[in-house]
Image: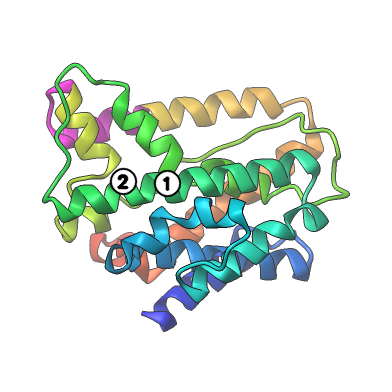
Amino acid sequence: MLAKMLETACSYAETAYAHLAPAHRHYVALYTACVLYAEDLGARDPAAVAHFARRLIAGAPQLSPVFDRLAALLRGAHALWTDAGADAIIASTLDALSATALEHAAGARGGMAVAPDATRWPYYLRTRAGGGPQYTHFMFMRGWRESPESYLQILPLSFYKEELVGERTNYVHLRAAAEQITPMEVLQRLTAEVLDTAERIERVVGDDLELRDLWHQYKQTYLEFTIRTPRYRMKELGVVP
């Protein structure tokens, strides 16, 4: 598991964030390894995930050395990222671990019941657990632009590997339960929503050549990382030659 975690973390930092300085890529790789641990192995130590924020605020040692390392990374965020970016990285990390703890708790109970009319709940949980803000702000290291004038986000392409292992607490299944449709119908709607978002981002950054180039580079390398990384099992779909 450690080898897979490190391979994924390093590949992500070297592809999607190739434009960053070495210290920043090192930060992203370490951060990603800690987050992967929380997602994939945190269910074996749920208290360590659930109590991360409480112990961070209290200045107490974490319940896992992995989370001690993550806490140290958060304390050093402002040295590498813009103030707005570092604030978002810290706040979003606390949010993500809190939501991950909810997902682990639901998984331990065998699932998460969703009321048919609770259509906002899947989106709420996904925006907290998905890691969008921190990985967006990682794009903009301190010194690039100090004013936070842009915000970009791509939804992760992890549904296939989650479906293979029988996960039912992910965004697609929760949304299917809330909207009373099938997971495949949700996936089709989500595809259209992501394409629409990508088109709107193109319009937003169209007049800013520097930001547009950065967005195109990130989009392309993020997709390449997701397709080629064994974690997401895209090769089984014939996507990877």
Residue 82 lies, with reference to residue 231, above or below; the image says above
Q: Compare residues 106 and 226 and report the one nearer the observer.
A: 106
Residue in the image at 32% along x and 67% along y: 45
Q: Compare residues 157 and 89 and report the one nearer the observer.
A: 89
State the quadrant of the C terminus.
bottom left
Magenta-drawn stretch contains 189:
yes
Q: Which mark is residue 238?
A: none
Label 2: element kind: helix
Residue 37 lies, with reference to residue 207, above or below; the image says below
C-alpha span from label 1 to label 2:
7 Å
Q: Compare residues 78 and 56 and report the one nearer the observer.
A: 56
* Residue beneath disc 2: 102
Secondary structure character of the magenta stretch overall:
helix
How many residues crowd mark 1 within 10 Å: few (<14), some (14–19), many (20+)? some
Residue type pointed to by label 2: Leu
State the quadrant of the N terminus.
bottom left
- Say whether marks 1 and 2 touch (CB < 8 Å): yes
Residue in the image at 73% along x and 63% along y: 24
Residue in the image at 69% along x and 42% along y: 87
Q: How many marks?
A: 2
Label 1: element kind: helix
Q: Is residue 136 visible?
A: no
Q: Which mark is residue 98?
A: 1
Q: Compare residues 215 and 35 and report the one nearer the observer.
A: 35
| Magenta-tinted stretch | 179-192
Instruction: Give the quarter of the image for residue 216.
Output: top right
Residue in the image at 50% along x and 27% along y: 197
Residue 134 lies, with reference to residue 236, above or below; the image says above
Compared across the picture, whether 167 is left or right of 131 comes to left
Residue 66 position in % (x across, y down): 50, 72
Magenta-drawn stretch contains 2:
no
Q: Is residue 188 visible?
A: yes
